[in-house]
């Protein structure tokens, strides 16, 4: 019987696993350079943790099950709600600000397609306890550091930054009722995914009059923060949001990453819980889906915990990033190689072979041997298959003189060495 | 609203996560020293992957759900079936033997209790393609290396080793019908968990006559491999199985781990797929559940793939091992500390602070600063909270002379250093 794996999941054979570990390690390094510490939570969480806070879109995309006690559990689609629950549970004792990162396996039950899997890894960086734009800038700086860490440059990707308060103020200024704003945001978030006409139809269905739709189209054409002032939309709300964005860009310049970042009034993010700056990382070619998504969520922790606590952060999945690295030729060649391979001139002389194996492993050296104990020729073939750096050939010299033959598989040189000196 | 986490799952706050990473890294090191390479598979697998192969017990303990296409999916309760599926899918092209290890998050829907969680981590080491006892010994040697790696000794734990072929031959010799043997194994596997009388009742219910039950009790009292010969049970099957076990113990002696290992006729393992040697690691105090379980499963790969392939391996969970390490005082103290903390004499002089932060992070140094930019006193308090090794105080010397004050938080010494020289 052949059992097929579940669609949208992956098997990680050694070469795939080596790449995954390489990527995740780069995420860890970027997080730690900025002083973030790693945390994690369960992959099984109560369903209400997501449905209450992340909006209806995410609820439709969850894997869930009912346990024997009738509780509905979900496989986590993202880490932020877990993080919020964990902070809320220890809010009184955690030193502030909370600087946490996490690398999660997450699950989304959506149509599996290029760069969109049902089971994937996500890097999360979150900073709780700081209201100022410096915290948003710190998160974006970690993201850029992570991008640099995998070999990408400002010629490959850009961080597109907006502020929901700005967009909300502008939409309200167009005369859209407050309670319609989330719906308009939901439509705008689909801007890259559906044709312009479809977007127009959706806006009309949401109750936007022709003048409002035209006003929105004009706003969405803005290319620069300076465009905000140039229009007649400078209400106090808009002015305050624009000023906050200017401060954020000032910090990004001080971090030395201005060239990676640009204002994009069209960035909204799908999740309901964002309250301020929101941002995405896209490839400059526009070929792939967003690589990172992040933003400020100042209300989520208060809703889940005892007291309000400002917070911001981001998530970055492994699937799109992997595709982009492939596209740019940046996937590293990672060969798993044995360091030592112990062979015996006498075939399966296990006692002698294992004496040398024990010695080398005891010194921390990755050591293999031929478990089938065939001819020396077969053993050398196995050593080559294992890409061994050194082969140790065990012969009569071991019992006679405590020595073995060490063969350097790169140079082909071999010499007799005392076992005691082997492996450093 | 406070959402409670799911029972039997864990939140990993920084100190918990540091311990988890420490433990998992020790597992990785032991695996790699023996030349095993890391692989992984999905956590969501088709339910039939488990129900067909692992016996009914595991099926009752699964989290499962029906997807929208009506396929029944399970959260993996163990890694071996995934490994078998992965090997089967590439059987023709994988170099043999296959030496893989894996660190899985697994899920079992059983009663949560001490050392038994619903969501846990499991270390798996598997070796496929070798029939001889040397392969079983190699796996046990990796397990012992892993135990050593976390600080345990042969005075803390022991590997209890049996062979299912031996026990099956003995049970058949007592006159138990072949098709009753799995049931008898199932009862024996509960030996440590239920009182002796209950076991007797279960045996009687399984159809064992009084003489058979007494014969079995006599066999279970064996303490040593030598006891096998001393009885009148030396059928050719029993003799062959005993000879195989002797070879295995010979290899274990050659690996230098004889003192960790002993024969235990009562070890059965619950899973249906084992076909030869089976073993468990227990604490010598008998206080905890089994820490490792392993054995040979020569039929599983053939049943899932194109051709038969002998294999053996083990699994080790993190929960019981963690309890044992706590009990022995072996849990390491792992403090997450910042390397550098950048403070400003002038409060929120962001441009100067970020210049130094960029410099240090660019050199790979873990660097924090006070995102609220308060007084120098407050910043020094934050640096102490972050357990920073060094504090860099940025003042007028930066713009005047490109220099900053470096304070060693251990010695309390401080001196002016050029920014260029900071961070190595």
Image (spheres, coloured by chain):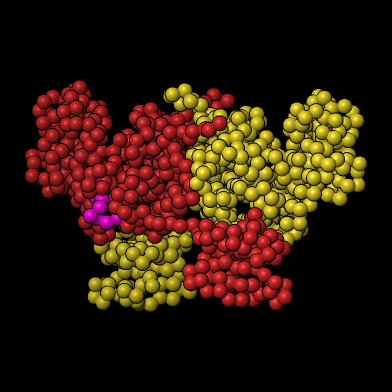
Chain colours: A yellow, B red
Q: Which of the two residues, B19 or A338, is positioned nearer the viewer here?
A: B19
Which residue range is magenta in the image?
Answer: B152-161
Residue B311 seen: no
Residue B178 image offset from top left, x and y in percent: 23, 29
Q: Which of the two residues, A8 or A183, is positioned nearer the viewer here?
A: A183
Q: Is residue A193 left or right of residue A23?
A: right
Q: Residue at point 62% right, 58% down?
A: B370
Q: Is residue B90 left or right of residue B352?
A: left
Q: Which of the two residues, B55 or A409, is positioned nearer the viewer here?
A: B55
Work out which quarter of the rendered image holds the C terminus of chain B and state it: bottom right
Residue A275 image offset from top left, x and y in percent: 70, 40
Q: Is residue B329 left or right of residue B95?
A: left
Q: Residue at point 39% right, 65% down?
A: A365
Work out which quarter of the rendered image holds the N terminus of chain B and state it: top right
Q: Residue at point 88% right, 40% down?
A: A233
Q: Which of the two residues, A135 or A156, is positioned nearer the viewer here?
A: A135
Q: Residue at point 45% right, 30% down?
A: B63
Residue B392 image offset from top left, x and y in percent: 60, 68
* Position above or below: A132 against A306: below
Is residue A126 found inside the magenta-colored segment of the image? no
Which image quadrant for residue B287? top left
């Amino acid at each position: 019987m052949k059992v097929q794996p579940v669609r949208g999941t992956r098997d990680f054979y050694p070469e795939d696993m080596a790449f995954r570990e390489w990527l995740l390690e780069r995420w860890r390094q970027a997080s730690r350079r900025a002083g973030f510490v790693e945390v994690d939570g369960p992959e099984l969480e109560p369903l209400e943790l997501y449905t209450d806070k992340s909006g209806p879109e995410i609820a439709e995309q969850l894997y869930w099950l009912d346990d024997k006690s009738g509780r509905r559990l979900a496989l986590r689609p993202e880490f932020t709600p877990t993080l919020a629950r964990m902070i809320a549970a220890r809010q009184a004792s955690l030193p502030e600000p909370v600087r946490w990162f996490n690398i999660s396996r997450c699950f989304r039950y959506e149509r599996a397609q290029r760069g969109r899997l049902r089971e994937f890894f996500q890097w999360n960086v979150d900073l709780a306890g700081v209201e100022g734009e410096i915290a948003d800038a710190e998160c974006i700086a970690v993201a850029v550091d992570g991008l640099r860490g995998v070999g990408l440059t400002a010629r490959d990707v850009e961080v597109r930054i907006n502020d929901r308060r700005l967009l909300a103020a502008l939409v309200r200024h167009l005369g859209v009722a407050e309670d319609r704003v989330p719906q308009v945001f939901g439509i705008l978030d689909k801007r890259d995914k559906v044709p312009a006409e479809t977007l127009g139809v959706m806006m009309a269905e949401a109750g936007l009059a022709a003048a409002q739709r035209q006003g929105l189209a004009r706003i969405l054409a803005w290319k620069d923060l300076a465009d905000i002032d140039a229009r007649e939309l400078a209400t106090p709300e808009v002015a305050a949001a624009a000023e906050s964005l200017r401060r954020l860009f000032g910090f990004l310049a001080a971090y030395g990453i201005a060239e990676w970042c640009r204002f994009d009034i069209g960035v909204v993010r799908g999740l309901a819980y964002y309250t301020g700056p929101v941002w995405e990382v896209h490839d400059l070619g526009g070929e792939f889906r967003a690589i990172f998504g992040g933003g400020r969520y100042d209300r989520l922790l208060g809703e889940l915990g005892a007291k309000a606590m400002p917070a911001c952060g981001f998530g970055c999945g492994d699937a799109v990033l992997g595709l982009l690295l492939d596209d740019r030729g940046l996937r590293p060649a990672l060969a798993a190689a044995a360091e030592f391979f112990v062979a015996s001139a006498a075939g399966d002389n296990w006692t002698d072979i294992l004496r040398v194996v024990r010695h080398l492993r005891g010194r921390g050296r990755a050591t293999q041997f031929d478990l089938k104990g065939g001819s020396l020729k077969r053993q050398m073939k196995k050593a080559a298959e294992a890409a061994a750096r050194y082969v140790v050939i065990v012969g009569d010299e071991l019992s006679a003189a405590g020595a073995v033959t060490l063969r350097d598989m790169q140079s082909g040189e071999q010499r007799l060495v005392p076992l005691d000196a082997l492996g450093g």
